[in-house]
Amino acid sequence: MAAATQLAREYELIYILRPTVGPSEARKVADRISGIVDKRGAKLTRVDNWGKRKLAYPIRKNTRGIFVFLRLVGFDGLIAELERNLRNLDDVMRWQTIRLEHLHDLSTLEVDPEEVEFREIETSDDEDEDPTFEESLGMKPRPREESRGGKGKDKDEKAEKSGDESEEKKAEGDASEKSDASEKSDASGEGEKAEAAETSDEDESAEKKKSGEGSSSDEEE
């Protein structure tokens, strides 16, 4: 009778390294994990370096950490041994293990070598440095970033541009009002001229009428 195949369980493990750790220290942690996995007859199926990220809360006075994600398949006792070693490593600040529901046959489980390679961590100078003790207490203001200064400069330029546009619109409105007033003044002057011309015509007609009446009176006499 053939022996029953023992199935291994799948796990996910995330551990956080100190933000100031170097590639050599990170490699020591990776080698320790790989050695335990091989010794326990388990297999790594995925390794992913998430890089430096901001922590939800400070750990050992650090606000950032380097996250490394692992997926592995093994039997009972594997996770306990991994966590015991991670606890004794000073460069590891925190870790978390999740047990998945999937079961695998290790004898037939295939693994892509590129998916389980521990790549060297990359340090970036663009990220913010951890605040000092005085800065965390608000006793010393942190220097403003150039990007923030650029944003403030952009806001000032937008405000100046908006002010210039408002002044231009105001000047256009004043010119329009002056133009309307000038048109009204011209129209009023033309009306007065027309009234004066009508009055002059009426006076001339009255004078002509009077002159005609005088001529008629002389003829009768």
Image (cartoon, rainbow, N blue to C red):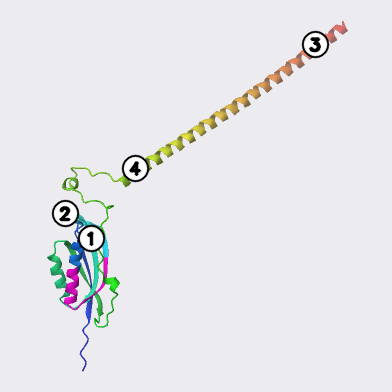
Give above or below for 200 relative to 109. Answer: above
Which residue corresponds to mark 1?
A: 66
> How far is disc 4 from disc 1 in space, using C-alphas?
31 Å
Tell which circle, 4 or 1, labels the residue nearer the N-terminal end: 1
Q: Position of residue 154 (x, y in %)?
A: 38, 43
Which residue is labeled 2 in the image?
Answer: 61
Viewport quadrant of the C terminus? top right
Is disc 2 in contact with disc 1, using a CB cutoff of under 8 Å? no
Amino acid at dot 1: Ile
Element assignment for label 1 = strand
Where does the image place residue 50, in percent across and percent down from the top left? 27, 63
Residue at the location (18% across, 66% down)? 29
Q: Which residue is mark 4?
A: 152
Q: Residue at x 70, y 18 (%)?
A: 199
Q: Nearer the viewer, mark 1 or mark 3?
A: 1
- Residue 45, magenta (yes or no): yes
Residue type highlighted by circle 4: Gly
Which residue range is magenta in the image? Answer: 31-48
The CA distance from mark 3 to mark 4 is 88 Å
Residue 83, position in %: x, y? 15, 69
The numbered mark, 2 or 1, whose residue comes first in the sequence reads: 2
Q: Give me the residue at 25% from left, 79% from top.
A: 103
The crowd level at tag 4 (other Cα within 10 Å; few <14, some 14-19, many 20+) is few
Residue 211's label in the rendered image is 3
- Observer-side mark, 2 or 1, equals 1
Label 2 is placed on what type of residue? Lys
Query: Dot 3 lies on which element?
Result: helix
